[in-house]
Amino acid sequence: MKIAVLTSGGDAPGMNACVRAVVRSTINYGYEAYGVFDGYKGLVEGKIRKLDRNDVGQILNRGGTILGSSRLESFKEKEVRQVAVDNLKALGIDNLVVIGGDGTFRGAMALNDMGINCIAVPGTIDNDIASTEFTIGFFTALDTAIDAIDKLRDTSFSHQRCTVVEVMGRNCGDLSIFSGIACGAEIVITKDTGYNEEEILRQVQRAQNMGKRHLIVVVAEHITDVSKLAKKIQDNSGYEARATVLGYIQRGGTPSAFDRILASKMGVHAVDLLTEGKGGFAIYTKSLDVGHIEINEALTKEVKPSDLYKYLSKLN
Ligand code: F6P
């Protein structure tokens, strides 16, 4: 059996950990692993190479993706995908793991329908894949955003300012709302909250009336021009205001422990499915739900050993 892996769409910290898991577990099954370079674009261009265990050494902790990534609009066209399928078949590869966001998933579904067994692994900082609670890269990007906003808070406090911060996420507000909660932002604006300028100005006023020395407003990207919003706030309140767009810094950096482990587990699971002859599946994880049980009952429960030890032998 031959299993190829590619990364596609916006890169996300933890993609490398997943590539490593796919390659190592494939080899540990006694099968051949292949890397496709530069996403679907590279697949169409035939940039496919056999990988060995050492090719994926020293990458677990690296941000970005060693395979490279791309966005290829024309992959929606069947003739373009046919070239990709032919390139894989020419090497005798009929199993593919793709790591990326929803565009990547759509490509995988189409390839699966064309005879390549595909497994889609959610890898994007946006956390905008409905079938999984968390995507690879989300928590690392969140840590980056939090770190930046904490720093902005320092200077915001010193100067009694209102700081308006734009956070990535494409059409999903998760990075904004999670970082807003983790940083104690006074106002968070996403697609879900809606954008109502008068209401925002009222909230700023309320904060001022409460005696807040400074405040943080987190705004998800594509909602409004944060510089204009900062100016509006400055003109209509007692705060000086400044805007910061966090931008691509959120996509880079060393993956967090959570993302490394999630990516490793997902990569192994993807290969397990392919070895069982299963294609057309999307990997998911759940859940961070919060609930409650009686303390008495909590104390009668045994600590379950983590199932992670099962993964170790597949990852080395
Ligand atoms: O999907 C990840 C993401 O960083 C989004 O948050 C952002 O909207 C988009 O990619 C930017 O895309 P590009 O890399 O094509 O500029």
Image (cartoon, helix red, strand yellow):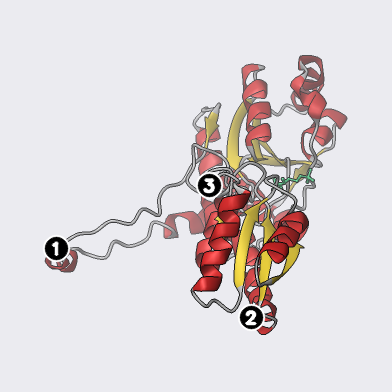
The residue sitting at 72% across, 61% down in the picture is 230
Discs 1, 3 touching: Cβ within 8 Å: no
Badge 1 local density, few (<14 within 10 Å), some, or many (20+)? few
**Mark 1 lies on residue:** 297
The residue at 60%/46% (across/down) is 195
Q: Quadrant of residue 298?
A: bottom left
Give the labeled residue for mark 3: 193
Secondary structure beneath dot 3 equals: loop
Furthest toward the bottom, the residue is: 158
Give me the residue at 77% from left, 33% from top.
Answer: 40
**On the image, numbered disc 2 is attached to which residue?**
157
Q: Disc 3 residue type? A: Thr
Foreground tag (1 vs 3): 3
Q: Is residue 156 above or below residue 91?
A: below
**Earlier residue among tags 1 and 3:** 3
Categorize mark 3 by other alpha carbons within 10 Å: few (<14), some (14-19), many (20+): few
Q: Is mark 3 within 8 Å of ligand 1?
A: no
Which element type, helix, strand or loop, lies under badge 2? helix
Query: Does the Cβ of the disc 2 residue fall within 8 Å of ligand 1?
Result: no
Q: Position of residue 43 (x, y in %)?
A: 80, 32
Kind of residue at disc 1 = Glu
Mark 1 vs mark 2: give the one in front. 2
Residue at the (21%, 64%) spot, across then down: 302
- Is 215 displayed left or right of 6 in the figure? left
Instruction: Tell which of 201 and 178 is nearer to you.
Output: 201
Q: Quadrant of the N terminus?
A: top right
Task: Name which quarter of the figure residue 227 lies in.
Answer: bottom right
Marks 1 and 3, how far apart at CA: 38 Å
